[in-house]
Amino acid sequence: MMNWRKIKFYLNLHWIKLILSVIILATLITTIIIIFSGLKAWKESESYLRQTQLAAIPLQMFMWMVMGLIQGVITTWLFYWLIYKKGAGSFSQTSKKSIAGAKIGITWNDVIGMDEAKQEALEVVNLIMDRAALHKIGGKILKGLLMLGPPGCGKTYLAKAIATEAKLPFISMSGSEFVEMFVGVGAGRIRSLFKKARHLAELDGGCLIFIDELDALGTARGIERGGGGGQAEHNQTLNQLLVEMDGLKEKDLNIVIIGATNAPENILDVALLRPGRFDRKIYVDKPNLEDRQKLFTYYLKDVEYDAATIKVDRLARICVGYSPADIANIIKEAALIAIRNKKQLISDKEIDDARERIALGIKRRFKYGAEEKLQTAYHEAGHAVTTYLLVPKKDVFKVTITPRGHTGGATWVPQREEILIENQNQLLDEIKISLGSYAAEKLKLGFTTAGVSGDFNTAFSTAHNMVWRFGMGKTGLIGDFHAIDNKYISEETKSRLDIDAQEIMQACLREVEELLKKEDALLERLAKELIAKEELNYDEIEAIFKEFGKGRAQ
C-alpha cells in the first residue's frame, strides 16, 4: 500500500518530466530501428555501392549523433521551460520544497524560555500523532494554530520543533510571498501550496504548513491598499486561503496550518479566527527572569567563556525585556569582540560591550571639546541621580559619555523585575527619568542643549498617553480619546487634555529640580568622575552614591 502511495505521489509531482523522458526514449528507439533497417538494406545492395557508402558512414554517423543529441537537448529544455517553468499557470505556482520533520532537528530541548507556549504546542503535537484516540471520542483534529507575540521570541523555532516532534513534512512560507501586483497570482499560489500539502499528507500521513508574517496575507478585508488592483488581489488571496482551510474538512488528511504574526491580533480578518480555522492560539511572550537564565546558559555552552566573571543570574537581571533572539545576538557579538581583542575567553566586559554595540552602535571616533564634554556629563549625571534616588523599579547599571551611533552618551537603567502593566506612579517615574537631563543642564549650566530632544519625546509621549488614553489627568476627563476620530473631539476638550498633560510634565520637572538642587554635590561628583573616566560601571556608580551615604529609592 505504501509503495503504491509513493508511486502515485511521484506521478502527480513529476508527470511532465516522465512524459518528456518517454518522448526522448521513443525517439532513441526509433533512431536505432532506422539505423538497423538501413544496415539491412545496405547489406543487400551492390558491392561497389557498399564500398562507396562505407567510406562515408563514419562521418555521417558522427554528424547524425551530434545533431540528434543537440536537437534532443534543445527540444527537452524548451518543453520543460515552456510547460513546466513558464507555462500559463507556473507564475502562480509555489516553488517551496517540503522538509521532512526528522531532518529539521529542532527538538523541545532546543526551545528555551517559553514553557507555557511549549506546553500548548505539545498538546497540538499529541493531537496530531494520536488521531485514533481523538476519533474514538468523536473529536476532530484542529486545522489552524496561530502564534502571536513580539519579534524574536521563537515563534518560527517553535513551529519547527512541532514538525520535528510530529515527524511530518514541513512547508514554510512567508505571507508576503503570496501577495503580488497581479490579480489572481496569490490565490493560485495558495492553491498550489495546499495541493502540494495534500500530496505529502497522502504520502506521509500528514503535513504542516507554516505561514510566517501572516498579517501580510490575513489583514482585514476592506482596508485600502492603494490602486493597481492591490485590494482585489489581497481579497482574492485571503478568500482562497479561507476556502482551502475549509476544504481540509472534506478529507481527514491531517494537515495543520500554523500561522505566526508580530502584529496585534485585532488587525487580522475575523473570518480567519473563527472556529474551524485559526481557532487555537499560542501567545509567545518575552522571557521572564528564570527563562532568561536558561537562555544565557543555553547559548553560553556553545562558546568559551570566563565563568569567574560571567554570572548568568546577573546577566538575566540586567536584560529585562530582551527576547531570545536578542540574547543569542549578544553572545554572538561578544564572541566576535573577544576574537577582535585576541582573547581566548569571553568575559563580562565583552558581554557589556556587545550589549552597548547592539543597542547604540559602534563607538564613534568623535572627540568632545571640553565644554561639550561637560554638558554631556551633566546631562547623563542628571538621569543617573534621578533614577537612583526617585525610581525604585529601576537600576542604574552603567553611565557613559562615549559617543555611539546617534547618541552622545547613555545611562542604562534596566527594570529590576518584569512589569506587565505599568501603573500611574511607574509612568510618572518614566517622565522624571527623562526630565533629569533637562533639569541638570538647566541647574548646572544655566541653559539647556538640543540633546534633550529625545528625552522630551519620551516624557511628553508618556504624559500625553496618561491623559488622552488612560484617564490620569487632573481635570478628571476619562476615556481613550485616540479611539475616536479627532474631529469628533471639541476644541475645548482638546485644550483641557493638553493642559493636563503639560501639568504632569511640570509637576515631574519640579520634583526633579528640587532633588538635584538638594543633591548638587552628588551631581557634581558624578559628572566630574564621568569627565575623567568617560564610563562608569555598576560598582563604580554604587561606590559614589555610598560615598554620599545615599541608598536606592524604595
Image (tube, rainbow, N blue to C red):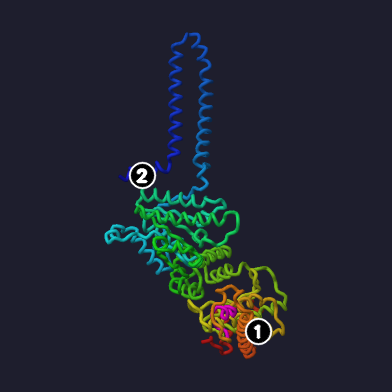
Given the current orientation, which residue lies at the most extreme left position? Answer: 136
| Residue that appears at 46% across and 55% down | 241
Element under disc 1? helix
Residue 387 sits above or below residue 120 on the image:
below
Mark toward the start of the polypeptide (1 vs 2): 2
Report the residue marked by disc 1.
439
* Residue 29 horizontal/vertical position (percent): 43, 26
Amino acid type indicated by mark 1: Ala
Question: Comparing marks 1 and 2, which lies closer to the viewer?
Answer: 2
Where residue 249 sits, quadrant-wise, is: bottom left
Q: Which one is nearer the viewer's eye here, 433 or 302?
A: 433
Q: Does 214 sit left or right of 198 as displayed? A: right
Camera sees residue 521: no
Amino acid type indicated by mark 2: Lys
Pointer 1 and pointer 2: residues touching (CB < 8 Å)? no
467 magenta-colored: yes
426 magenta-colored: no
Residue 464 sits above or below residue 366 on the image:
below
* Residue 437 horizontal/vertical position (percent): 64, 81
Element under disc 2? helix
Q: Which one is nearer the viewer's eye here, 208 or 166?
A: 208
* Residue 506 horizontal/vertical position (percent): 63, 85
Report the residue marked by disc 2.
6
Task: Identify the mark at residue 61; answer none if there is no mark.
Answer: none
The number of discs equals 2
Classed neighbour count for the residue bearing mark 2: other residues with Cα under 10 Å, few (<14), some (14–19), many (≥20): some
Residue 493 sits above or below residue 333 on the image:
below
Magenta segment range?
Answer: 462-473
Q: Does 23 sit left or right of 5 as displayed? A: right
The Cα–Cα distance between marks 1 and 2, rounded to whole angstroms, is 75 Å
